[in-house]
Amino acid sequence: MHPFRSHSLYVLTAALAAAQVQPPPDHRHDHDEPLALENFVISASPYARSQADLAQPTGVLAGRELNLRMAPTLGELLAGQPGVSSSYFGPGASRPVIRGLTGDRIRVLENSLGTTDASVISPDHAVSLDPLLIERVEVVRGPAALLYGGNAVGGVVNVITHRIHTSLPDTPVQGRLEVRGNSADREESAGLVLEGAAGPIAWHADYYHRRASDVKIPGFAESARRRAMEDDHHHHDHDDDHDDHDDHHDEEEPVFGRIPNTALRNEGGAFGLSFIGRRGYFGFSHSVHDSRYGIPAGVHAHLHGHDDHDDHDHEDDHHHEEDHDEDVTIDLRQRRWEFQGEITEPFGAFRGARFKLGTARYRHTEFEGDEIGTVFRNRGYDGRVELLHQPVGVFTGAIGWQGGRSDFEAFGDEAFVPPSRTTTNALFVFEEAELAPFTWQVGARVEAQDLALRDGSGTQRDDTALSASTGLVWKLDDTWTLAASLARTQRAPNVQELYADGPHAATAAYEIGDPTLRRERSLALDVTLRKRAGFVTGAVTVFANRFNGFIFEVPTGETAVPHHDHWHFHGGHDHDDHHDDHDHHHDAEGGLPVYRFVQRDARFHGAELEAVFHLHGDGANQLDLIVGADFVRGRNRGDGEHLPRITPARTKAGLVWSHGPWVLGGEVQWVSGQRRTAPNELPTDGYELVSAYATYRHVAGRTVWDFFVRGTNLGDAEARVHTSLLKDVAPLAGRSVNAGVRLSF
């Protein structure tokens, strides 16, 4: 039997059996537990709601688990959550992948506002925040377009920083100091938070610094499949031209033990003020985030081959290639302002109102050695207003507006997307009706997107997208809840999908957009069974999502070859049979395979399980068994082919024991191999990740010391993330220990 199926069958059987066991008396759990359905979520509704009271499946990472799973990037921080994986592009850059969807279908937010960066454009572009000092992360799995637009068709990740206070702190000064390190990359990080109150004014200040070296791995950087393909390629070249083999095909030593050029340095901070009164509050914050990180060595080399068939230009092209053999590093800088306010007293037909506005200036420079290769800039804002109306019959809810603008430009070697201005405006309504034992949640959204190119062509495109959703929460009894949601979503194509035209090193392809693409439509269904108390607590979810006009890239069968300042295109259109995985190599002319954005009907389906078995609890001691599993399938509905980079099936199990100030735990995660691959995509082997951790809390008056240590990948397994474009050149870190201390006062 397939490993995932056997593990999942055991877990599901155990969960159903344990649900019939009589719960122990007065068994309570705090917010730091790995799974607590009483966590309140603000990202799935205009009102803060318990996870158990929402129609959509959600996740919350906070407290002890957030502290133990801390990572330099948001994608790696969330990669172990149900239904969530990572687009891992080395230690410096990764975005969350939810149910096989990422990029412009996952909305990454900071305090419910867009991050205004360039992370959607390419997987080597980092999200413009460091998770070190965040308070919590909320994840909505599945469509959240109603509140956040068509770009949230796959889900929402909302990072809460708490830099703008909504209520007065208890003391004039309070804060925390945190120091940690990691053995895998010799990471050293530290953060300081200070905040307090003076009369009606609450203030906040923070600073963080993170520094790490090249990441340590358990074996070769390149996978066995890639090394075998390269050996075959070299042997083929030797047979064709053995006289020149020694001159032009000297093999380099394979990278072993570490991934070169993966060091990173993050630094930033923020300051915020809030004015808090009887009728509400108003606050603002200013934050700075600077990051310098390397792209794993060899990734950008796809762009810099030369034309061996033109003898006249051979010397100049060879010199050009040598110029670009330098390591590529990215220097990212963002300056961000946030404004937030709320009226908490009723006025007229409304119970209250709130608004949020975020503005940012973002610059991202790619250095090839000491030379500037490409610069990306983004300036824009994202704002929203929500009016919470008085009850109308059985209905309570809100109406709202959301708008934003992004002025994006890129110039340099990889400026494959033209400069553009994207403006959005949307109106939405959300209503909820409680008719015990049922709670209905319905809503609709209309969103206008105006996209104008700023390249002098006068090109402009306007799209209007309509989205609607309905949900039902059925409280079967005091412990069991059945929830279902149905969402119809439309997403307008972005500037990259419409107008890309140029080489893109992160995907090792020459990308071409299609200005005739229409709006992407989807119909998604989620059904979740939850249990909130008793011997076992948790949730199991099944989901399906059908897309009409799903936008993705396919190979055309052509090869783009650089020649002076132009690209020449060669080859035919039979891409299914004659081209290997574009992530790894291209033809002998040193060109790039050409990929074009197309639309096809597609379908996704899968399931997610998360459960805690409370094995023992007597007040002083507590022992829990934590289990989880998820899988997703994604196919082209036309020809049945699998879609690229779909998350493989995963299962995990762990034990957590707490005794007074001590907490000890361990976990094993089984990741299945992925053989359901798209054309031109290599399969990925499965792996197991073993981890263990310990925490100790010492309380002395108002001062709290938290000591923690976590070992990850203790088996030193070679782990390659199938959802990553770099899966065959950059595996996850090997055996490592992350340790630190947090002082709260």
Image (cartoon, rainbow, N blue to C red):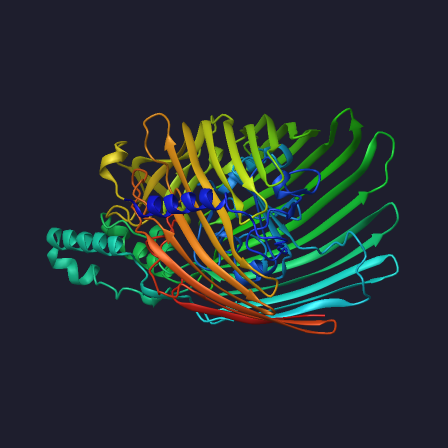
For the question of whether residue 141 can be seen, the reply is: no
Q: Is residue 183 above or below residue 548?
A: below
Q: Is residue 219 left or right of residue 106?
A: left
The location of residue 732, given as percent across then percent down, is 39, 59
Q: Nearer the viewer, residue 594 or 309?
A: 594
The location of residue 579, given as percent across then percent down, is 25, 40
The location of residue 407, given as percent across then percent down, is 61, 42
Q: Is residue 394 above or below residue 500?
A: above
Q: Is residue 250 left or right of residue 69?
A: left
Q: Is residue 311 left or right of residue 126?
A: left
Q: Residue furthest bottom?
A: 700
For the question of whether residue 638 can be seen, the reply is: yes
- At x 28%, y 49%, the residue is 585
- At x 59%, y 55%, the residue is 129
Q: How many marks?
A: 0
- At x 37%, y 27%, the residue is 637
Q: Nearer the viewer, residue 343 or 91?
A: 343
Q: Quadrant of residue 391?
A: top right
- At x 65%, y 28%, the residue is 440
Q: Quadrant of residue 387?
A: top right
The location of residue 13, given as percent across then percent down, is 41, 43
Q: Nearer the viewer, residue 429 or 249?
A: 429
Check the picture and name the quadrant holding the C terminus.
bottom right
